C-alpha cells in the first residue's frame, strides 16, 4: 500500500499546529486522524504512542562540502549518510561525465552510504 503524508497532514493541519502548538498534533484531532488512517492500513501506532512521544532537541549535524557549510538533521536521521555520500562524490568530477556514468556513481555512493549507516 502507499500512504501519503499529504493525505494526513494537510496545509490546514500545518496551520493548526503553527497556531495551537505541538499538542494539536500529538494530543489533538490531527493525531486522531493519523492513527485512524494508519489503523485502516494495518498500522500499529496508537494515540497513546503519540501522546507519550517525547522530542529531543539535538544540535544539527554540520559538515562542509566543496566550500559550502551544510546543516542537516543529526542521527538517527540521515544527515550523516548525506555527509558520507557527498564526501565520496567529492572525489569525482561528475559534472564532466556522461550523464549515465555520473548517475551510476551517484547511486553507488548512496548505496554505500546507506549500507554504512548501520
Image (cartoon, helix red, strand yellow):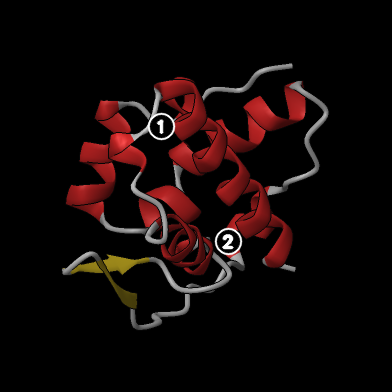
Residue at (31%, 77%) from the top-left corner?
A: 62
Sequence-first tag of 2 and 1: 1
> Quick one: quadrant of the N terminus?
top right
The x, y position of residue 58, in whole percent, is 40, 82
Q: Nearer the viewer, residue 118 or 12?
A: 118
Q: Quadrant of residue 12?
A: top left
Q: Which residue is mark 1?
A: 9
Q: Dot 2 lies on which element? A: helix
Is 91 rendered above or below residue 93? below
**Is 51 drawn above or below residue 40 in the view shown?**
below
Asked whether, in this view, residue 16 is left or right of residue 68, the answer is right
Q: Quadrant of residue 6?
A: top left
Task: Give the position of the C terminus as an image quadrant.
Answer: bottom right
Cα distance in 3D space between marks 2 and 1? 17 Å
Question: Horizontal and vertical percent for residue 74?
Answer: 45, 73
Query: Does residue 31 appear to the left or right of 40 in the view shown?
Result: left
Using the image, tell me which numbered label, if any, was put on residue 101.
none
Percent x, y for residue 60? Answer: 33, 76
Give the residue at x 28% y 38%.
95
In the rendered structure, the answer to whether residue 48 lies left or right of residue 16 reads right
44 or 3, which is in the foreground?
3
Left or right: residue 24 compared with residue 116: left
* Residue 27 appears in the rendering: no
Residue 65 in view, yes or no: yes
Q: Who's the residue at 58% across and 61% down the image?
A: 51
Residue that carries the numbered disc 2 in the rendered image: 51
- For label 2, the crowd category at 10 Å Cα-Cα, with few meaning under 14, some 14 to 19 and many 20 or more, is some
Residue 99 drawn above or below residue 29: above
Judged from the image, the secondary structure of the residue bearing numbered disc 1 is loop
Q: Nearer the viewer, residue 83 or 33?
A: 83
- Mark 2–mark 1 contact, CB under 8 Å? no
Question: Which of the two marks, 2 or 1, is nearer to us in this view?
Answer: 1
Amino acid at each position: 500500500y502507499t500512504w501519503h503524508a499529504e493525505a494526513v497532514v494537510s496545509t490546514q493541519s500545518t496551520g493548526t499546529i503553527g497556531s495551537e502548538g505541538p499538542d494539536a498534533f500529538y494530543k489533538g484531532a490531527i493525531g486522531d486522524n493519523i492513527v485512524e488512517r494508519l489503523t485502516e492500513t494495518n498500522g500499529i501506532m496508537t494515540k497513546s504512542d503519540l501522546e507519550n512521544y517525547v522530542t529531543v532537541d539535538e544540535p544539527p549535524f554540520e559538515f562542509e562540502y566543496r566550500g559550502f557549510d551544510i546543516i542537516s538533521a543529526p542521527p538517527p536521521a540521515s544527515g550523516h549518510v548525506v555527509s558520507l555520500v557527498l564526501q565520496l562524490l567529492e572525489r569525482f568530477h561528475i559534472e564532466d561525465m556522461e550523464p549515465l556514468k555520473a548517475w551510476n556513481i551517484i547511486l553507488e555512493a548512496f548505496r554505500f552510504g546507506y549500507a554504512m549507516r548501520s
